[in-house]
């Protein structure tokens, strides 16, 4: 009886040992063969606006520095451009000349000019009268045979010339009274409009010498120093809007899974040691030449990479562009 009892105990110990070995093997196998989580890492991105001017010149003043927060409409840079100022002076002078010409055309001739034209016409009329009397006298003598035909023709030519001179003088007098023609008035008015347009164009360029902030944000970079020359379109500052920040992830298509538009995902932000909920707002395939990857050596298909953007559902305090975000996806 004693031998049987001891045999049962040995059997129990053996069974317990076997069970323990099985459990240990199962645990080891589970750790060895369990699905390995794939970490998908992204980073915080933000819209960056580059401040540049249309006018070349020299940096006269910088009103903001790197790290400073600015508001919409704040003056950031003042550019000194002597060329624009010179063009404005030229355009202003052209406007003055055009307006003077326009006033002259609309007002007509001065009273002195009208009086002078009248006197010239009267003088020509007197010349006509004298030439007419001379022609009549020579005509009578010609009929009597006293003067030759040549003398008669010469006197007649002088008479006709006097008549033409008188007509021209009268025309000048009439023009002086009437003033400039409608076409001349229209042309002078057009010159004024052209000069005004030139001034507006120069003033538009002149306004570009003072660069204002288009958004409220933080200055991240300032490129030139005070006194340096900048060309047209040359970058001067960069501004970021920290209220419009999102995360960008590069995800292989076989890992997209349930990542759909407007779906919420949970990520960890190591820099802030906290988790956050993001909402997917953008999914787009990246350029194929850099994102194809063979999924198997024998290759069933090539996986393409997609850019997935997601915005925080709620504001994240102290979040900065460039901070990493980590999300895990289990491949089954």
Image (cartoon, rainbow, N blue to C red):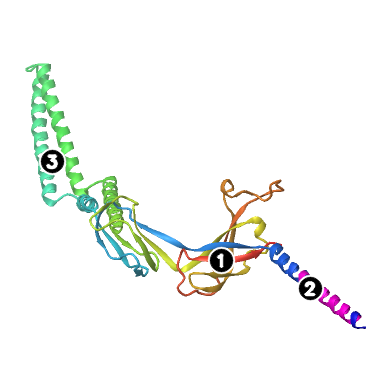
Q: What number is the disc on residue 121? A: 3
Q: Residues within 10 Å of mark 2 (few under 14, many from 20)?
A: few
Residue, disc 2: 17
Residue 209 lies left or right of residue 44; in this view the side is left
Residue furthest out toward the right: 1
Asked whether the beta carbons under mark 3 and mark 1 sit within 8 Å of each other, the answer is no
Residue 125 lies left or right of residue 282; in this view the side is left
Q: Vertically, is 46 above or below 156?
A: below
Magenta stretch encompasses residue 303: no
For label 3, the SS is helix
Q: Nearer the viewer, mark 3 or mark 1?
A: 1
Looking at the image, can residue 103 be seen?
no
Q: CA distance from mark 3 to mark 1?
A: 100 Å
For label 2, the SS is helix
Asked whether the beta carbons under mark 3 and mark 2 sit within 8 Å of each other, the answer is no
Tell me which residue sits at (15%, 34%) in the image.
165
Q: What number is the disc on residue 326? A: 1
Q: Nearer the viewer, mark 3 or mark 2?
A: 2
Q: Nearer the viewer, mark 2 or mark 1?
A: 2
N-terminal label among 3 and 2? 2
Residue 278 lies left or right of residue 87; in this view the side is right
Q: CA distance from mark 2 to mark 1?
A: 43 Å
Tell me which residue sits at (93%, 83%) in the image.
1
Residue 332 lies left or right of residue 227; in this view the side is right
Q: Vertically, is 136 above or below 226?
A: above
For label 1, the SS is strand
């Amino acid at each position: 009886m004693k031998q049987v009892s001891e045999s049962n105990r040995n059997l129990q110990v053996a069974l317990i040992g076997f069970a323990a070995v099985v459990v240990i093997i199962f645990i080891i196998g589970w750790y060895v063969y369990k699905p390995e989580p794939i970490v998908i890492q992204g980073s915080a991105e933000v819209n960056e606006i580059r401040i540049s001017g249309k006018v070349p010149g020299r940096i006269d003043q910088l009103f903001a520095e790197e790290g400073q927060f600015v508001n919409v409409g704040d003056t950031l840079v003042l550019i000194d451009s002597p060329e624009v100022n010179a063009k404005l002076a030229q355009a202003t002078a052209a406007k003055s000349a055009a307006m003077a010409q326009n006033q002259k055309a609309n007002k007509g001739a001065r009273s002195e000019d009208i009086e002078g034209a009248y006197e010239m016409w009267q003088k020509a009329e007197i010349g006509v009268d004298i030439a007419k009397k001379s022609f009549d006298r020579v005509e009578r003598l010609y009929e009597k045979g006293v003067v030759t035909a040549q003398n008669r023709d010469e006197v007649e030519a002088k008479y006709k010339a006097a008549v033409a001179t008188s007509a021209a003088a009268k025309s000048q007098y009439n023009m002086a009274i009437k003033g400039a023609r409608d076409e001349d008035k229209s042309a002078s008015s057009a010159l004024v409009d052209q000069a005004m347009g030139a001034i507006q164009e120069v003033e538009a360029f002149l306004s570009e010498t003072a660069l204002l902030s288009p958004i409220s944000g933080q200055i991240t970079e300032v490129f030139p120093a005070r006194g340096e020359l900048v060309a047209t379109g040359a970058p001067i500052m960069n501004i970021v809007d920290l209220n419009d920040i999102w995360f960008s992830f590069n995800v292989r298509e076989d890992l997209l899974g349930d990542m759909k538009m407007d779906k919420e995902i949970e990520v960890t932000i190591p820099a802030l040691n906290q988790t956050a909920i993001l909402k997917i707002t953008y999914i787009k395939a990246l350029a194929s030449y850099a994102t194809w990857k063979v999924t198997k050596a024998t290759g069933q298909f090539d996986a393409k990479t997609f850019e997935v953007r997601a915005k925080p559902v709620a504001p994240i305090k102290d979040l900065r562009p460039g901070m990493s975000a980590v999300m895990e996806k289990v491949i089954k």
